[in-house]
């Protein structure tokens, strides 16, 4: 297929490079021309642009990979420039119908993964969740998805939103807690790397245990003396977050044993 890429951020950077192995990338658009040119060069694409009015009208597929809040705006500007093509976006929480006024055949290709441009990712292991407005559109999107990964699952907009919420808790919020841990360690001139064996062991347990079974720590033991000691050493946001999460674990264990 000839594929036009709309967006040149972290998601676009990784998925476009994966698609490039099987398809021809005919254009990359980004509001930043430098970003568009960098991605285009990486996939030997001849055309990069920062002018949304110059998006090609003869591609076989268009993939919108921009921030969730920008999808509707971008889609509106691209309405019906090519109704024979398949259109899709890559958002977890934006509904499939966000493209209903853009094209006749449309859908979603949502990768459940965290992307950073300079991080190496094996895209073949990424779970991809697909949805479309017709059976034919779903088949076309699935064909594109198979060029990225073999882990492809159908998921409607409500299911994807739940997936996205779960991913935010599991990944984004967890990373926010790692940042707090890093700040606490820095107060004693300790590197974050000292926690890596602990984090790796915690993740490894989840290969054969549910999170509720793998939970350890003062709150899991109901050790209020340690919890109170830790709280007395914390202030502000760190104090509030520690208490909130400890209460959540304590309440879960209480409900489990009622």
Image: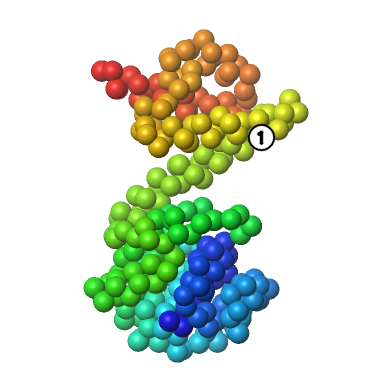
Give the residue displayed 64% in from the left and 57% down from the top.
Answer: 118
Tell me if 69 is positioned left or right of 49 in this view.
Answer: left
Vertical placement of residue 167 versus 142, above or below: above
What percent of the width, then of the height, locates residue 85?
Answer: 38, 83
Dot 1, how many residues are within 10 Å of its Cα: few (below 14), some (14-19), or many (20+)?
A: few
Report the residue at 30% width, 54% height from top: 159
Extreme-bottom residue of the structure: 58
Please tell me which residue lies in front, 258 or 2.
2
Classify 229 as above or below 134: above
Indicate the secondary structure of the residue bearing disc 1: helix
Question: Which quarter of the rendering shows the C terminus?
Answer: top left
The image shows residue 25 at horizontal and vertical percentages of 52, 79
Mark 1 sits on what residue? 193
Q: Is residue 250 above or below residue 92?
A: above
Q: Quadrant of residue 47?
A: bottom right
Q: Is residue 139 above or below residue 68?
A: below
Taking the spot 50% from the left edge, 87% from the top edge, the residue there is: 56
> Which sits in the foreground, 220 or 32?
220
Residue 201 in the figure: left or right of residue 250: right
- For residue 28, say whether it is visible: yes
Q: Quadrant of the N terminus?
A: bottom left
């Amino acid at each position: 297929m000839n594929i036009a890429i709309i967006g040149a951020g972290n998601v676009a950077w990784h998925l476009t490079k994966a698609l490039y192995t099987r398809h021809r990338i005919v254009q990359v658009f980004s509001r930043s021309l430098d970003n568009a040119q960098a991605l285009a060069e990486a996939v030997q694409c001849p055309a990069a642009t920062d002018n949304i009015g110059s998006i090609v009208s003869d591609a076989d597929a268009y993939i919108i990979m921009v921030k969730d809040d920008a999808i509707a705006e971008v889609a509106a500007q691209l309405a019906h420039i090519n109704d024979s093509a398949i259109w899709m976006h890559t958002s977890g929480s934006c509904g499939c119908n966000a493209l209903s006024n853009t094209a006749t055949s449309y859908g979603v290709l949502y990768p459940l993964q965290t992307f950073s441009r300079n991080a190496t990712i094996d895209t073949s292991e990424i779970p991809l969740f697909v949805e479309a407005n017709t059976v034919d559109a779903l088949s076309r999107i699935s064909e594109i998805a198979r060029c990225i990964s073999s882990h492809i699952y159908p998921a409607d907009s409500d299911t994807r939103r739940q997936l996205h919420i779960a991913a935010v808790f599991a990944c984004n919020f967890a990373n926010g807690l790692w940042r707090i841990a890093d700040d606490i360690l820095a107060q004693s001139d300790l590197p974050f790397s000292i926690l890596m064996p602990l984090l790796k062991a915690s993740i490894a347990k989840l290969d054969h245990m549910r999170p509720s079974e793998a939970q350890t720590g003062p709150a899991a033991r109901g050790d209020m003396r340690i919890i109170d000691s830790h709280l007395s050493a914390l202030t502000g946001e760190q104090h509030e977050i520690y208490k909130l999460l400890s209460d959540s674990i304590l309440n879960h264990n209480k409900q489990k044993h009622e």
